[in-house]
């Protein structure tokens, strides 16, 4: 049987699987960290907007919201929740909108879907091209330790959904086979360390990055499974958004 593209059939059940994800807490955390930096965004662009759950807390607070995602099925669900948002079907590495934002946000390890560091750097460069001078990027990523723990050989099954996880420590790449009512799609994720991500951000043109663990706000350690990275765009505009 041939597999469907990632996040196509899973879109049908995605929100049911995500019931316990702290979307509101993440948004509050990120806004509090940025507030501590003296920054209060008025517009936000999410990379990997999915079904829109992570953008909703920003829309509820009155921010202008927009999103990019490769999956038409995920975007269809997002459009139903966020009818006024600008939602673009495109790849992180090459997307182009005709405007800039105060905040580029990426929740729930969307960027780990880029399994090559050069691709992650390309996505950061596109993020920077869409940030206002002095704007911020805030992204949540899985570490290699997190993928090793969360994606170790394991099967989860409920109501017609079967998730089969695997992890290759040599490449730090996890593989998820997601079955929905007998149909298959495959996801790959690479774990990134805070140091790797900070270096890729600086290579892409951002200022010095810092990494924090939700919800306590401590620095990530060797056992941290995921972290939020924050990096600021230079105050002079870089490149262009087109
Ligand atoms: C785990 S979901 C997260 C969705 C949403 N941010 C949330 O928190 O529920 C990852 C999303 O990233 C998107 N994605 C993965 N790789 C992508 C790429 N290279 N370009 C654009 N979107 C991508 C997928 O289609 C999917 O919707």
Image (tube, rainbow, N blue to C red):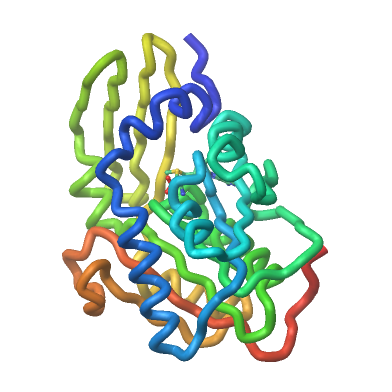
Q: 45 or 70, which lies in front?
A: 45
Q: Residue at x 43, y 18 (%)?
A: 184
Which quadrant is the C terminus positioned in?
A: bottom right
Q: Residue at x 30, y 14 (%)?
A: 160
In this picture, is 90 found above or below 221? above
- Give residue 33's quadrant in the image: bottom left
In this picture, is 212 found above or below 77? below
Q: 230 or 192, which lies in front?
A: 230
Q: Residue at x 60, y 80 (%)?
A: 135
Q: Position of residue 151 (x, y in %)?
A: 25, 41
Q: Residue at x 38, y 75 (%)?
A: 195
- Give residue 205's quadrant in the image: bottom right
In this picture, is 62 found above or below 47? below
In this picture, is 143 found above or below 213? above
Q: 145 or 211, which lies in front?
A: 211
Q: 154 or 232, which lies in front?
A: 232
Q: From the viewer's perspective, tell me whether residue 107 is left or right of residue 49.
A: left
Q: From the viewer's perspective, tell me whether residue 127 is left or right of residue 12.
A: right
Q: From the viewer's perspective, tell me whether residue 222 is left or right of residue 180.
A: left
Q: Position of residue 101 (x, y in %)?
A: 66, 70
Q: How many marks?
A: 0
Q: Position of residue 3 (x, y in %)?
A: 49, 19
Q: Position of residue 147 (x, y in %)?
A: 27, 49
Q: From the viewer's perspective, tell me whether residue 213 is left or right of residue 201.
A: left
């Amino acid at each position: 049987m041939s597999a469907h593209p990632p996040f196509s059939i899973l879109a049908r059940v995605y929100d049911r699987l995500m019931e316990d994800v702290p979307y509101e807490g993440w948004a509050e955390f990120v806004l509090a960290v940025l507030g501590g930096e003296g920054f209060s965004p008025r517009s936000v662009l999410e990379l990997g907007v999915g079904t829109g759950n992570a953008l909703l807390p920003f829309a509820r607070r009155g921010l202008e919201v927009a999103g990019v995602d490769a999956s038409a099925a995920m975007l269809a669900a997002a459009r139903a929740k966020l009818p006024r948002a600008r939602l673009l079907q495109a790849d992180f590495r090459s997307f182009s909108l005709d405007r800039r934002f105060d905040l580029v946000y990426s929740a729930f390890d969307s960027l780990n879907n880029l399994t090559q560091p050069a691709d992650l750097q390309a996505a950061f460069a596109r993020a920077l091209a869409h940030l206002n001078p002095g704007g911020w990027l805030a992204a949540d990523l899985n570490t290699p330790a997190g993928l090793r723990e969360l994606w170790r050989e394991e099967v989860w099954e409920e109501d017609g959904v079967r998730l089969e996880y695997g992890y290759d420590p040599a490449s730090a790449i996890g593989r998820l086979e997601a079955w929905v009512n007998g149909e298959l799609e495959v996801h790959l994720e690479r774990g990134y360390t805070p140091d790797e991500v900070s270096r890729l951000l600086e290579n892409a043109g951002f200022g010095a990055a810092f990494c924090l663990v939700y919800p306590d706000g401590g620095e990530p350690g060797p056992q941290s499974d995921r972290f939020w990275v924050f990096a600021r765009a230079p105050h002079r505009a870089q490149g262009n958004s087109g």
